DNA sequence: CACCCTACCAAGCATTTGCTTGGTATGGTG
DNA sequence: CACCATACCAAGCAAATGCTTGGTAGGGTG
């Protein structure tokens, strides 16, 4: 048994990962374009030039932040689609998974919400557009299955419904704060209830 | 009857107003901080310095854009609150007014959605925070009245419901396009229906 | 014709920004 | 002890950005 010394082996975040966490928080707070490399370096206690020892560019940083997160998120959606729950349960699970992502990966969600439109204009971020299409497909599949199996109203406009759900779920990242008045499972409960049954008495 | 020559008297937009319209579109597209005065000047076909003949600063431009819009919007909310419709109708009207604002003042809504958090950090934009509080009050009043009068479920979490409604309604500015597949009244119809009765069969 | 107002140009300045370059300190590892 | 990888500093550059200054063109108005 030889002694190990790399951070990974000790189950600690590497310096690189630490810097990405710091960058993600700043990108989420101020937006990608409005966060300077000097902001990130200051928050990390180093000089801006030193960041370039770890990363090629500011873009590489968001790239790594977003692609890592999305891979994990879409793996969860795939699980739901592959399961043999009924349509209603799948829809519920999809909503819950999303609010959970806000809880656990708030900065990543916020960056995607705020900066994806801009980033997509660069070739290297083309995968963001693909993920967007994929996400749309997930929700539409669930909604259409719901209508087909009779769980949802037959007259439902699934395209519009998809947009409403997507907006409400993901924009919650703007106000949801871990440790706040409602925890994420409670928020998901309330939204599922309203979505399925409405607010009428 | 003397001949008049000012744009206002001829019912034409003044140069100042034209420039504000151009600026609003750019601010909405790229964000306030990421729109340069040169961008605005280019779009208007003049040099960047010439903008300062019309406006004190870039900030003055958003200021005028946002304050003008909000004044008109909140006058409509006040009308609704003052009316003697029942709670359900008032809620419906509030939703409709909001989607209508997206139709008719898309850039203004987008700027508020994207840049208010940043702008509020400046004293001169303190009124944006006031408007935010005011808007919250409008929705909470309507929801509470609904619960009180029995139109809405007695167990409704009005705070959470307010957030869900606000998010869905205003974030629609990201995807709603005038002249697109659904017009704004149709979008409002569908959302009101889902909000009140849910998507379940 | 003299005057003036509106709308603009031409040139530039100070600051901020992403990134580069060449070097240094430190703690393992053979 | 020699070597090397990791993590950083110090200094600076080119481009972009908000805004300033002094001037000009042209259409009304008395």
Image (tube, coloured by chain):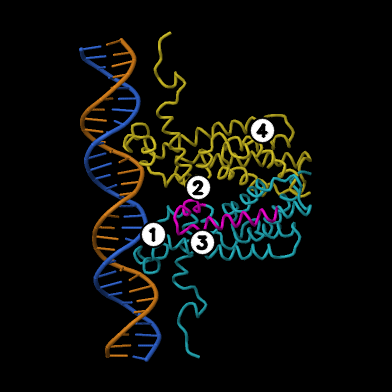
Chain colours: A yellow, B cyan, C orange, D blue
Q: Position of residue B152 (x, y in %)?
A: 76, 50
Asked which secondary structure carries label 3, the reply is: helix
Q: Quadrant of residue A122?
A: top left
Q: Are marks 4 and 3 in contact (CB under 8 Å)?
A: no
Quadrant of the rendering where the C terminus of chain B is positioned: top right
The residue beneath circle 3 is B66
The residue that appears at 68% across and 62% down in the rendered structure is B81
Label placed on residue A41 = none
Q: Is residue C30 left or right of residue A195?
A: left
Tell us which disc is closer to us: 3 or 2: 3
Using the rendered image, report if marks 3 and 1 lie on a common chain.
yes
Tell us which disc is closer to us: 2 or 1: 1
Per the rendered image, the range of residues in magenta is B114-143
The residue beneath circle 2 is A117
Spatial CA span between label 4 and label 3? 43 Å
The residue beneath circle 1 is B37
Which one is nearer the viewer's eye here, A27 or A123? A27
Asked which secondary structure carries label 4, the reply is: helix
């Amino acid at each position: 048994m030889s002694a190990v010394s790399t951070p990974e082996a000790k189950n600690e975040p590497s310096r690189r990962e630490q810097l990405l966490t710091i960058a993600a928080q700043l990108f989420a707070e101020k937006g990608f374009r409005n966060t300077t490399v000097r902001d990130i370096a200051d928050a990390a206690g180093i000089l801006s030039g030193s960041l370039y020892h770890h990363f090629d560019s500011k873009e590489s940083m968001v790239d790594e932040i977003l692609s890592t997160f999305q891979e994990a998120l879409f793996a969860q959606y795939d699980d739901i689609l592959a399961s043999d729950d009924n349509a209603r349960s799948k829809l519920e699970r999809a909503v819950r998974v999303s609010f959970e992502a806000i809880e656990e990966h708030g900065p990543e969600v916020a960056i995607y919400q705020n900066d994806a439109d801009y980033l997509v204009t660069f070739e290297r971020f083309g995968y963001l557009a693909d993920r967007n299409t994929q996400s749309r497909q997930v929700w539409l599949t669930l909604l259409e299955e719901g209508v087909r199996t009779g769980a949802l109203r037959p007259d439902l406009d699934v395209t519009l419904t998809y947009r409403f759900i997507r907006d409400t779920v993901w924009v919650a990242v703007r106000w949801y704060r871990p440790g706040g008045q409602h925890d994420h499972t409670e928020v998901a409960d309330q939204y599922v209830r309203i979505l399925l049954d409405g607010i009428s008495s």
